[in-house]
Image (cartoon, rainbow, N blue to C red):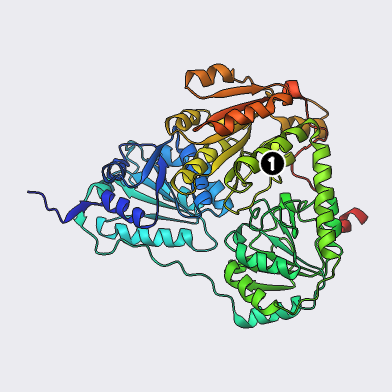
């Protein structure tokens, strides 16, 4: 008679993840992860999304985590399957996404013996360490939950990131006593020093034109950012920091970090406080962007001090705690130049005007999309997911307006082809939490890379409007070839599917827009259809952008230019 007090390690893992608040997980079933997935299915408390590949599954889990503001989970097999997930793990590591990657492993007695065992990979744990914040191997059934608890704690502790765990198949199948405690470990925030906050507040209290630069590490600090904005700070954000302060707020500049009007504004500021941002190369003109002369920084990672730019003062700590302490100290003490608010809005409006001119005919698309979002989603109840594509570089990283830090999901690592899967993950995240509509922007080059995930979108009835910008080429690469390689075009023209026929074959609603006058009708269909909907923009018919984007912007630093 079976012992009812014993469960498989796979079932214990499922129960633990439920206690972590996980409502959905993503992956591909295999002989080396079936005990975990069988437990998901039998317990029925975690929705398992059957991706068509491990790369897509991991991108989905990443976007899910960003959208719900919690833990993402991806489940893969070992060997090639774990390797398939590695690129998406790099993306999660770049974005600082709290993600748990559970990968199977071959039977413990045969591990690390180079026997040619099916699904074995040489030095797999080393590979996982390279693409994760941390990586573990569970070696015995009795230690499984303890390792899992520690892995989740590491993933969720700032600076957050993905953590991988190898679990041999015999360990997954093993019976253990029902664990007495299946609750996650507490997440300890890095508490900033009171003395450090006193010093920073004293320095900032002397500023009359202060600015905030917010990165992804400030995504949870919206309330405190609003307090500082009301005290007079102007606010600029990285791509990952969008929505921490709603982008219709009068204090917001937005993600126009390197536009000429905003760079000019920096030169009039007497202090900038950078919070939770790495000041990445593509947002600082390869670190040649002229920031204010006085630069302060707050970050949970003490090693961020001095990276990219020198810090005049650095505070180590959780962004929410640090900004609360700072706002408390600055209340009633700042005397901000009355002209700063107008100058902030002027810099934003001048940047917007330039953007709308640069995109040429696609200004109509931006305006109509914003109007639709404002009407259907009240401007806030939507997710904006983008692949790395020419259209995103031109406008998607800055518009439409976001009002919540969890609304924006973008492939920060610069790898194309992740947007489709991320759109599905964000839609699943909304399905188990807010019910928000998801809108995804992609180019045809990236879209086709994980095209199989279209079937996942249909099977899962993911509520996502996919906007496919189709110019049948790698648009950015063509521009680089024009700018650097004498206009020689090699390896950039793409044979693309007939998306009307492809969509029909998998029961995916689709419409093609060859004239932007027809866009209103297309958006009406997309936003009122429950489940996935593909809007294909025929860029060859509509035309190109007015301005040319040929890779991340950069400039020669002033000292080198003089030399």
Q: Name the residue under label 1.
A: 396
Residue 94 located left or right of residue 485 = left
Residue 84 visible in the snapshot: no
Residue lying at the far left in this picture: please name it.
1
How far from the left and from the top, in percent, is residue 69?
51, 55
Which is nearer the eye, 31 or 560? 31
Instruction: Tell me the SS state at disc 1.
Output: helix
Q: Vertically, is 455 above or below 371? A: above
Residue 261 located left or right of residue 470 = right
Which is nearer the eye, 147 or 66? 66
Q: Give me the residue at 59% from left, 79% from top.
A: 193
How far from the left and from the top, in percent, is residue 342?
84, 60
Residue 174 located left or right of residue 472 = left
Residue 520 visible in the snapshot: yes
Q: Give me the residue at 35% from left, 57% from top.
A: 19
Residue 144 located left or right of residue 248 = left
Residue lying at the far right in this picture: please name it.
562
């Amino acid at each position: 008679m079976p012992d009812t007090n014993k469960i498989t390690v796979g079932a214990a893992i499922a129960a633990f993840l439920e206690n972590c608040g996980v409502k959905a997980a993503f992956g591909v079933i295999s002989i080396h992860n079936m005990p975990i997935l069988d437990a998901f299915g039998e317990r029925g408390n975690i929705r398992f999304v059957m991706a068509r590949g491990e790369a897509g599954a991991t991108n989905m889990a990443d976007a899910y985590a960003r959208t719900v503001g919690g833990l993402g989970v991806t489940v893969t097999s070992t060997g090639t399957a774990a390797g398939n997930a590695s690129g998406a793990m790099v993306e999660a590591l770049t974005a600082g996404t709290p993600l748990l990657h559970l990968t199977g492993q071959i039977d413990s007695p045969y591990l690390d013996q180079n026997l040619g065992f099916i699904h074995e990979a040489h030095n797999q744990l080393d590979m996982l360490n390279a693409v994760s914040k941390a990586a573990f191997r569970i070696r015995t059934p009795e230690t499984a939950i303890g390792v899992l608890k520690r892995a989740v704690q590491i993933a969720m502790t700032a600076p957050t990131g993905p953590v991988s765990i190898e679990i041999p198949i015999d360990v997954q199948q093993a019976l253990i006593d029902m664990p007495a405690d299946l609750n996650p470990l507490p997440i300890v925030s890095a508490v900033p020093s009171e003395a450090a906050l006193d010093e920073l507040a004293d320095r900032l209290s002397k500023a009359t034109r202060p600015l905030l630069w917010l990165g992804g590490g400030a995504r949870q600090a919206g309330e405190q950012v609003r307090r500082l904005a009301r005290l007079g700070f102007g606010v600029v954000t990285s791509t990952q920091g969008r929505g921490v302060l709603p982008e219709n707020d009068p204090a917001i500049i937005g993600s126009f970090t390197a536009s000429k009007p905003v760079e000019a504004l920096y030169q009039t500021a007497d202090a900038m406080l950078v919070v939770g941002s790495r000041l990445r190369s593509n947002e600082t003109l390869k670190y040649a962007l002229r920031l204010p002369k006085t630069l302060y920084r707050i970050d949970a990672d003490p090693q961020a001090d001095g990276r990219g730019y020198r810090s005049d003062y650095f505070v180590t700590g959780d962004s929410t705690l640090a900004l609360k302490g700072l706002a408390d100290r600055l209340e009633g003490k700042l005397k901000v130049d009355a002209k700063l608010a107008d100058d902030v809005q002027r810099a934003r409006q001048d940047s917007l005007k330039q953007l709308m001119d640069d995109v040429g005919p696609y200004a109509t698309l931006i305006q109509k999309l914003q109007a639709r979002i404002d009407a259907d989603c009240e401007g806030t109840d939507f997710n904006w997911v983008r692949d790395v594509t020419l259209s995103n570089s031109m406008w998607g990283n800055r518009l439409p307006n976001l009002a919540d830090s969890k609304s924006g999901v973008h492939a920060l690592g610069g790898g194309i082809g992740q947007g489709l899967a991320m759109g599905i993950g964000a839609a699943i995240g909304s399905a188990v939490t807010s019910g928000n509509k998801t809108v995804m922007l992609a180019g045809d080059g990236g879209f086709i890379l994980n095209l199989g995930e279209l079937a996942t979108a249909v099977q899962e009835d993911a509520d996502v409007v996919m906007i496919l910008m189709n110019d049948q080429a790698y648009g950015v690469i063509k521009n680089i070839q024009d700018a650097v390689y004498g206009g020689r075009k090699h390896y950039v023209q793409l044979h693309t599917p007939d998306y009307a026929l492809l969509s029909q074959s998998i029961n995916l609603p689709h419409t093609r827009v060859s004239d932007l006058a027809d866009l209103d009708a297309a958006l009406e269909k997309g936003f009122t259809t429950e489940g996935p909907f593909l809007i294909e923009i025929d860029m060859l018919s509509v035309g190109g952008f007015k301005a040319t984007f040929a890779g991340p912007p950069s400039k020669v630093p002033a000292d080198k230019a003089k030399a």
